Structure formats: structure tokens, C-alpha cells
Image: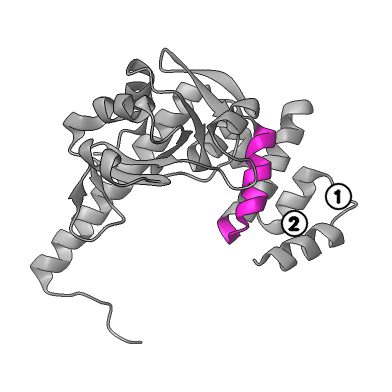
């Protein structure tokens, strides 16, 4: 989304509430509600857990590819 | 192993004067977008940076934006001025910014900040309004998505679901 598209979208949704606008944009409001229920400590710990899980998955993927010799999916 | 919590707490322990900004500040204010780094705005080129160096020196910090992974050593600060310092450490990325677009330097950011309690430490973070100003000024697609999220979060704080 460019800045111009952003402004256009805001203009076209000016009669909506901020929550409605976010939903219209495609944002999952339940994730925001979930975030707002957490304390700052819980938030940063949740972020760290997610980062570590993503890193572990990436490492596992690299190892699997290295062992199998497959570096990309075959063409469809 | 990423541990952004410990990076932020290290800065407080070392008495670094900073304001959390960027993705982590947005996440703390209600955005659902995860972040990979600790962004802080601080006074670069002062003894504050010496304290920052002390806070991370045992975490093998290096300048991640430079080829060759140049180690972050204090002597560099005397010979070459930095506007921003982008570090990678054993615990994750730490970006020290001299300015936040749309707001300004550390002093200005302090006016747009509020204290939060995190992991037993009190630290300053940009307010939700401050982040909105910065994100709009940055104007990248992910920043604009964060604007929609943070505006929704602001509304939810006023009128809880």
C-alpha cells in the first residue's frame, strides 16, 4: 500500500470506526484484543517465544534441505 | 537466541537514557505485528553511548549493516560520528537511532513517551500517539498497516470489547 492508497482508503472508510476500518483492511481484530489483554512483560515474552520458534523452524528447514539436497520445490 | 526482553532490561540496568520506538513500541501499545529487534532512540555521541556499549559488550555486538560484520567497539565513536547504530548481538538486533522520523531526536521523543513496567524494570516508550505520528511519517506498507492496527487499539482502549 502506498501513502496515496492509504489516504484513499482512509477517505473511503471515513464513516467507519477505527475497528471497522482495520477489519475492512483485513486486520484480525481478535489479535489486537488478545494483545491488549497482556501486560508489557507478557507481550515481549510472547514476542520472544515466537521469534525463537521461527528461528528453530528455519534452522530445521535448512538442515532438512541440506540433508536431502533439495533447495527448492519442483515446478508445478 | 533472540531475547529482546533481556536486551531492553540490560539498557535500563546500564542506565542508558533511551525511549523505545519502532516495532517493539508498537507491539507494546497494541499492534499484533511481531518484531525482530529492539529499536531505541537515544543521544548518540555522548556518554550515553558508552553506557550502551557497556550494556551489550559481552553479547558480541557488530554493525549488521556493514559488510564484514565489523565489531562494535567504543573507539569507533571517537573517530566517526554515527547518526544511527544498527547492531546484531547474541540476543538479537538492537537499533540505536539518533532521530525518529516525524518526531525528532531523543529530547523530542521523550515528550512523546510514557513509562512502562516491563520485567521488573521501568523504561520509557513512545506513546500510542507518538508511534502513530512516526509510523505515518515512515510511510512504508508495514508502517501503514500498523497505523490501522494502532488506531483500532486506541479505540479498543477507550471502548473495551
Residue B134 falls within the magenta-colored stretch:
yes
Instruction: Check contact, mark 1 vs mark 2: CB within 8 A.
Output: yes
As drawn, the residue found furthest toward the bottom would be: A76
x, y (%) of residue B28? 54, 31
Q: Element type at marker 2?
A: helix
Against A64, is A54 above or below? above
User: Is residue B73 among what the camera can see?
Assistant: no
Q: Which residue is mark 1?
A: A16
Can marks 1 and 2 be said to lie on one chain?
A: yes
x, y (%) of residue A31? 58, 41
Residue A76 sits in quarter: bottom left
Viewer-closest of B125 and B144: B125
Which span of residues is magenta-colored? Answer: B128-142
Q: Residue at x 30, y 44 (%)?
A: B87
Q: Residue at x 42, y 37 (%)?
A: A47
Q: Element type at marker 1?
A: loop
* Cα distance in 3D space between marks 1 and 2: 9 Å
**Magenta-drawn stretch, dominant element (helix, strand or loop):** helix
- Chain letter for mark 2: A
Residue B120 sits in quarter: top left
Q: Residue at x 78, y 61 (%)?
A: A7
- Chain letter for mark 1: A
User: Disc number at residue A24?
Assistant: 2
Left or right of B38? Residue B57 is left
Could you tell me how many numbered marks the image carries?
A: 2
Left or right of B97? Residue A65 is left
x, y (%) of residue A75? 32, 87
Amino acid at each position: 500500500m502506498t501513502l496515496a492508497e492509504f489516504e484513499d482508503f482512509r477517505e473511503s472508510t471515513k464513516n467507519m470506526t477505527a475497528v471497522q476500518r482495520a477489519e475492512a483492511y483485513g486486520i484480525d481484530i481478535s489479535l489486537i484484543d488478545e494483545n491488549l489483554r497482556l501486560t508489557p512483560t507478557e507481550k515481549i515474552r510472547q514476542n520472544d517465544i515466537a521469534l525463537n520458534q521461527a528461528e528453530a523452524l528455519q534452522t530445521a528447514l535448512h538442515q532438512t534441505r541440506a540433508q536431502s539436497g533439495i533447495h527448492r520445490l519442483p515446478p508445478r | 537466541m533472540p531475547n529482546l526482553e533481556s536486551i531492553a532490561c540490560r539498557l535500563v540496568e546500564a542506565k542508558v537514557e533511551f525511549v523505545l520506538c519502532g516495532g517493539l513500541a508498537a507491539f507494546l501499545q497494541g499492534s499484533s505485528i511481531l518484531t525482530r529487534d529492539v529499536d531505541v532512540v537515544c543521544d548518540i555521541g555522548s556518554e550515553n553511548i558508552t553506557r550502551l556499549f557497556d550494556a551489550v559488550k559481552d553479547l558480541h555486538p557488530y554493525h549488521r549493516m556493514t559488510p564484514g560484520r565489523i565489531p562494535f567497539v567504543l573507539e569507533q565513536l571517537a573517530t566517526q560520528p554515527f547518526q544511527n547504530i544498527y547492531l546484531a548481538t547474541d540476543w538479537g538486533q538492537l537499533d540505536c537511532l539518533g532521530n525518529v522520523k516525524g518526531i525528532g531526536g531523543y529530547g523530542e521523543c521523550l515528550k512523546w513517551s510514557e513509562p512502562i513496567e516491563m520485567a521488573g524494570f521501568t523504561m520509557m516508550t513512545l506513546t500510542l500517539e507518538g508511534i502513530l505520528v512516526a509510523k505515518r511519517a515512515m510511510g512504508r506498507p508495514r508502517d501503514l498497516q500498523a497505523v490501522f492496527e494502532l488506531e483500532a487499539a486506541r479505540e479498543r482502549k477507550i471502548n473495551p470489547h
